[in-house]
Amino acid sequence: MEIKNFTPRLYQERILDSCLKKNTLVVLPTGLGKTKIGILAAVERMRMFPSTKALFLTPTKPLAAQIQREFKECTDINEKEVVLCTGEVDPEEREKQLQNARVVVSTPQTVSNDVVNGKIKLEEFSLLVLDEAHRCVKEYAYTWLCKSYMKTAKYPRVVGLTASPGADNETISQVCKNAFVEDIEVRSEEDEDVKPYVQEVDIEWIKVDLPSEFKAVQEVLSGVYNEKMNAIRKLGMIGSNSLSKKEMLGVLASFQGRLGRGDKDFRVMRAVSLLAEALKVEHALEMLETQGCEALCSYLENLFAEAERTKVRAVKMLARDANMLVALVKARELVEKKVEHPKVSVLKQIVKNEVEKDLRVKIIIFNQYRDSAKKIEGELNKIEGVVASVFVGQAKKRGTGLSQKEQMLLLKQFGEGKVNCIVSTSIGEEGLDIPKVDLVVFFEPIPSAIRSIQRRGRTARTERGRVVVLMTRNTRDEAYHWVAVHKERNMHRVIQELKKKLVFQPGEKQGSLLSFNEEQIKVVVDARESAMIKELASQGLSVEAKSLDVADIVVSERVGIERKTVEDFLASMIDKRLMQQVRELRKNFERPLLVLEGEEDIYALRKIHPNAIRGMLAAIAVSYAVPIIRTKNAVDTALLIKTIARREREEGEREFSVRVQKKPLTTKELQEFVVESLPGVGPVIAKNLLKDLKSVKSVVNASVEELKKVEGLGEKKAKEIREVLDELYD
C-alpha cells in the first residue's frame, strides 16, 4: 500500500507523526493539504494494522465524492476498495460494498444509521478522520460517532481536520473533548515550514454609503426596535438597549428557560414577546442595510402573511405596529423606483472588469440569503461574457434548490470554465476543491471567524488570489466585519493556550465510557426516533430501526413503550393523537408503558387548564392501565429502557417478533374514529352522537337542530360541523 502522484511536504510529515501517535486535531489554513494528511494517516495506519480499515467522514456528499477521488488518485489501493457510502445507494448494495472496502468515505449521518443497523462495525477501523472537525460539537453526528468509535475500535485513532476550530476557548475545548483529542497540530501562514507553500491573497475592503432613501426606512425600523428594547428595559429585565444579536438570543433563551421551569412572572412573559419582536426588527434592519429594499420587502411581506395564520404573539403584535407597515410601504416605493443597494452596482463593475481582463476567470461570490443570491445571479448574467449560476443547498425554497447531483455538475462546469461565476450561500464555504479561483467576493461580512476563514480559503489554493469584501458604512456590515476579525485573532491565541494545557490521561478516555463487550440486548425502535436510536446504541443495546405503527420502542413481546417529551405530550393532547396512541398501546402489549421525558413544568408550557392535564394523566394511568414514568432527558430514558430490557431478558423474554402492523380496528372503533374527526368532537361527544343518531351516515346528514340536541354539543359546535360537511371542497 503506497502513496502516489504527490510528495508529502515537510509540515505534512511532521503533522503525520503526531497523528500516528495520538488522537490529533490538525488546524491548517485552507488549501495547504489537510486531506492529504488524512490520506497519509490512513495508509500508515492500515500498514500498521493490515486487517483494519479507514473511515473518512465529511459533512456533505459532494465533499465525500471529492475525497474519494483524491484517495484513488493518491494511493495504489484498489479503486473498488475505496467506497463512497451514501444514503442514495440501496442499503443491501451498500452493505455488499462495505464488506469489501478498505477505505470508506461518507457523511456522518449515513454512517450513524449503518452503525446502528449493524451494517458498519466500527471495531474494524484503525483510523477515523473528521473533515471540517469544527462541527464536532453539540448533537452533530460526529460527536456520537467518535464516542461509539472510541468504545468499540480495537486500534482507535482519531484525526480531526479543520482550518478554523472555533473562536473561543469553550468551543475549541468542546471539539477536543468530543473528538477525544490528545494533541493539537496547528500551523499558520507565518510558520517557517508552511511559508514556502502559502499563496499570497490580496484583500480589499470596498465601502459604500447607504442611500439617503434607505436611511428613511432605516429610521422607521430603528424607532420600532428602540421602542421594543426600551419597553424591556423598563420592565427591569435588561440593563441596556445596546445588545448584540447573540446577546439578545442568550437573554431570550434564559427567559424561555424560566418559563419552561414554571416561572409565571408576567414581566418574563412580556419580555419574551418583546425580545422576539425586537429580533425580527433587527433582522429587517439587517436585510435593508446589507441586502437592499427588495430583500426587506420580501421579509416584511412574509411577516405580515404569517401574522394572518399564526398564533405567535410576537408576530401578531409586530404586524399590528403601524410603523412596520410604513417601513414596508416606503421599501416598496423604492423597489418600484428601482433604487437598489449600491453594493449591487459595485459588484457588477468588479465582475465586468475581471471578465474583460480574462474570460477564463473564476469568481465566487458569497451571499447569506438565497433570494439575494438569485437576484445577483440575474444581474450578473446581463453582463457580456459572464455565465453565472447560484450554488445553494437541496431544500427547495420558493423554487430555489439544487440536488446533490446538480451541485456536483455545477462544480464540474465551474472547474471546466463553462460557468465562470458562482453565487453561493453558506454551502460553498466548506471544502470546495477547485484548483484555481481568481476572486472571492463577500457581498456582506459575517460575524464568524470560521465562516470568514472558509470563504477566504476558496482562493489562493495553488496561486495568488484576491478577496474583496463589500461593506456599507456605519451599518451592521462594519460591526460584523470587526467581530469576525477579533474572533479570528482570539482563535489563534486560544489554540496555542489549549495546546499547552492539553494533557491526555488514558484512564479517562475509556473509563468514563460504557463497554460494548457485554452480550447485547435487542430492542426495536421506530425509525423516526433517530435521537433515541443513537442513545440506546450508546448504551450498548442492539438496536433495530423499523417503521412501527404502535409504540416508539419495543423491548419484548409484551413490553411496548410510547415516548413523549413534555411538549409532545401536550401537543398530542391538543390534536387528539394521544388517546388513540394509548388505546393502541394497551391493545397490542401486555405491559404497555408511557415515558414522559423532560424536566419542564407540564402545567406551564401550554395554555391548557391544569385539570385537563390531570384528567388526561388519570385516564391513561387508571382507565387504560398504562403506567407513566417520568425521565429527565433522553439519556435518562435510554438508561431506563436498558434496565427494562435487561429485566425482560432475565425473565426469559429472549426472542421476540415485532408487530409493525397494528391490529385492525373494530367497526365500532372505526365509526368513533370517523366522527371524532369533526370539529369540536372528542371521544365522549363522538360516542354520544353515535348513540343518539345510530350511524355515521345519520350523523353526517343531521341538521343543526338535530345535532345540538346531543349531549355536549351546543348550537355553535353544531353549526361548525354543518359548515365543514356542507362547504364545497376547494
Image (cartoon, rainbow, N blue to C red):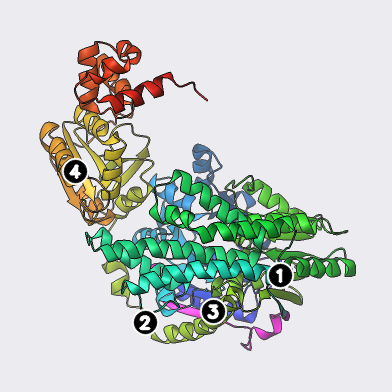
User: Which amino acid does the dot numbered 4 rest on?
Assistant: Ile
Mark 1 vs 4: CB contact within 8 A = no
Left or right for 616, reference 15 = left
Residue 31 against residue 430 in the figure, above or below: below
Disc 1 packing (10 Å; few <14; some 14–19; many ≥20): many
Q: Position of residue 373 (x, y in %)?
A: 68, 58
Q: Earlier in the sequence, mark 3 or mark 4?
A: 3
Q: Position of residue 504 (x, y in %)?
A: 36, 78
Between disc 1 and disc 4, the foreground one is 4
Disc 4 packing (10 Å; few <14; some 14–19; many ≥20): some
User: Which amino acid does the dot numbered 1 rest on?
Assistant: Val
- At 70% from the left and 84% from the top, the residue drawn is 196
| Label number found at residue 393 | none
Residue with the mark numbered 1: 441
| Label number found at residue 483 | 3
User: Which amino acid does the dot numbered 3 rest on?
Assistant: Val
Q: Secondary structure at mark 4?
A: helix
Q: Earlier in the sequence, mark 3 or mark 2?
A: 3
In space, the residues marked 2 and 1 are separated at their CA atoms by: 41 Å
Residue with the mark numbered 4: 613
Which of 353 and 665 lies nearest the eye of the viewer? 353
User: Which amino acid does the dot numbered 2 rest on?
Assistant: Val
Between disc 2 and disc 1, the foreground one is 1
Mark 2 vs 4: CB contact within 8 A = no
Mark 3 vs 2: CB contact within 8 A = no
Residue with the mark numbered 2: 503
Residue 609 against residue 690 in the figure, above or below: below
Q: Secondary structure at mark 3?
A: helix
